[in-house]
Image (spheres, rainbow, N blue to C red):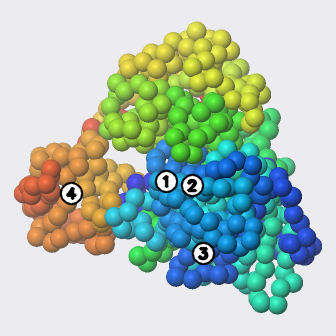
Amino acid sequence: MKRFPTLLLLPVLLSACATAATGPVPDEEVPDPTPAETVTGGDAFIVAHVDLAALENDQVPVEVDPGEIEESEVLFRFPRVVQGTYSVSDFGGFVEDVQAWDHEGEPMPVEAVDVNTWRISNATELDRITYDVNDTFDVERSDQETPFSPAGTNIAPEIFVLNLHGFIGYFEGMTDRSYDVRVTSPVNLRRASALPLVASDTSRADGEFTDLYFAERYFQVTDNPMMYGEIDTEVFPVGEIEIVLSVYSPTGTHDAGGLEVDMARMMAAQRVYLGNLETTDRYGIFLFLAGDGADQPTGFGALEHHTSTITVLPEFLDDAQLTDAMVDVVSHEFFHIVTPLRVHSEDVHYFDYQNPTFSKHLWMYEGVTEYFASHFQVREGLESRPDFYEKMAGKIENAAAYPDTMSFTVMSEYIIEEPYESAFANVYEKGALIGMCLDVILHEESGGERSMMSLMRELAERYGVERPFNDDDLIEEITTMTYPEVGDFLETHVVGTTPIDYSGCIEPAGLRVVEDEAQTTLFFLDQQTPFIDADPATGEVFFRQIPLNSTLIAMGVEGGDVIETVNGVPYSLGNIQALLQQSVQEWTPETTIEVTVLRDGEEVELSSQLGVPTVMENRIEEIDDPSPAQLELRDAWLGG
């Protein structure tokens, strides 16, 4: 999973501050038309039918036939939490009018147990369950808690985002049964699916068609997203992998062709970086670009799956901005092919959708993945060493906003609880830095012969998709496979609570971390890092819990302060761009800034001259007169 701060993708941020297994099947690639009714799975199948063509009142009807049930009572459920996310989603809260029907077509009693669960008694008589599904995108700006957008759903005549865990429920104790998934839609819609397409019935005279898909178990239902609608698709090879890129752009501003060259270049470099690691024959990239409407998603980022990733970004980005965002997002998600997809614990493998337990090793699942997404670019020549240094130094800065003595393994294990949930984003900052330090240690101890990637390849070969590791044994096992120094680092800084000396970590490569004073603007640290963020549900704009610049500190601003007015003008997410533009283009050092903030329920008046805002900024630099051993290690680590 990769999540962006809401304001990170505002165009003014990027422009004004600069002046200071089987993958998607595109529409044209379907099997020969076959009536869907002729393909059945017998009693072993659960048959689920999602009828997009019956869209009404922003809902679609779904029917689920469980096949033969031998128990007298059964629970029908929707996931409370889905894999790859680290928060509660409660997809059952988006389902209405759940009804059960017996083999004679008569209604049966249904008892709602909780938001995600319904009990059906006399279950041996159950023939099917029907219900209506609401999408999650529509309510993201309301007070209702909603799933992270890339894990969510959209229902609209022009575009359906089918994260199937939001449409198809499961029967308790039957998640290992295979699924026959049928999707009926208007014949004019294009589609892309990460589930294998078994057949497609286009012979109907009513302007609709039905696609038939197959999933070996419920996990495959949740692991394979789909999009139906006005999408643009490009198919291109990257080595032996076929990439299917599908884009929905509401105004047609962007298309798949505009991203193909950069995606192909990036993923080709990733494939080289991965070496001989087994990947997939086909990989799908689903890109939903959000417009400006009130029913549009605002939780930008991506969610990984075994053979695909689904990404949500704003449409207002220009071509270069969109490419940069996609390189950042997709490179991260594609590296999840390594972990947790091929290297994961029992908590991940035997995932409980209602009461999940979480692995201790987010440092590896998300942190090392994020590190790979940066390191491969310098290693394979896509970016310069100074760019890589700047990126890692930025992560040192960002990590400073989170508790530095919090055990990463404890945080991971209890990630949906406080205070750990609030620190989740640190997996992309300190987690990536953990990966960097381990990579340097492995290069140093092996004389440049081993790396973090080679270690992950060894773990993937030892375990793989179907064999999980024991959570409590991983660090000891890694130590045995590598060097005592690796185990010491993990026990001290990942299990333990000792802060990391990043300068000491990279000194063997002839690098060091230095602190300098750097100029900023009032609201942005640099071209990509805002001091403020916004809550899409409420529209509130607030100061982030990160080190602030000298002017904000002098003004008395505290992290968490909600901006009400600036120089007498009320501001919220709806009009914040005007303030950001003004702060960069019109204000001078002599401008007096008066800000009213809401702090702990009380209004606080703050004031200061703008001056020249500065921060103390970490920077990674190459040391003078490095030794031959340091240069050799640097080249082995970063490519030379």
Q: Tell me which numbered mark, 3 or 2, is placed earlier along the sequence.
A: 3
How far from the left and from the top, in percent, is residue 608?
9, 55
Disc marking residue 562: 4
Q: What's under tag 3, amino acid-wise?
A: Val
Q: CA distance from mark 4 to mark 1?
A: 38 Å
Residue located beneath label 3 in the image? 60
Q: What's under tag 2, amino acid-wise?
A: Arg
In the visual, does 45 lie left or right of 270? right
Q: CA distance from mark 1 to mark 3?
A: 23 Å
Q: What's under tag 1, amino acid-wise?
A: Val
In the visual, does 565 lie left or right of 248? left
Nearest-to-viewer mark from 1 and 3: 1
Q: Tell me which numbered mark, 2 or 4, is placed earlier along the sequence.
A: 2
Which residue occupies 52% across, 82% down? 57
Disc marking residue 113: 1
| In-front residue for pair 153/447 | 153
Nearest-to-viewer mark from 2 and 4: 2
Q: CA distance from mark 3 to mark 2?
A: 22 Å
Q: Is the C terminus in the top left, top right, bottom left or bottom right quadrant? A: top right
Q: Is residue 150 shown to the viewer in this render?
A: no
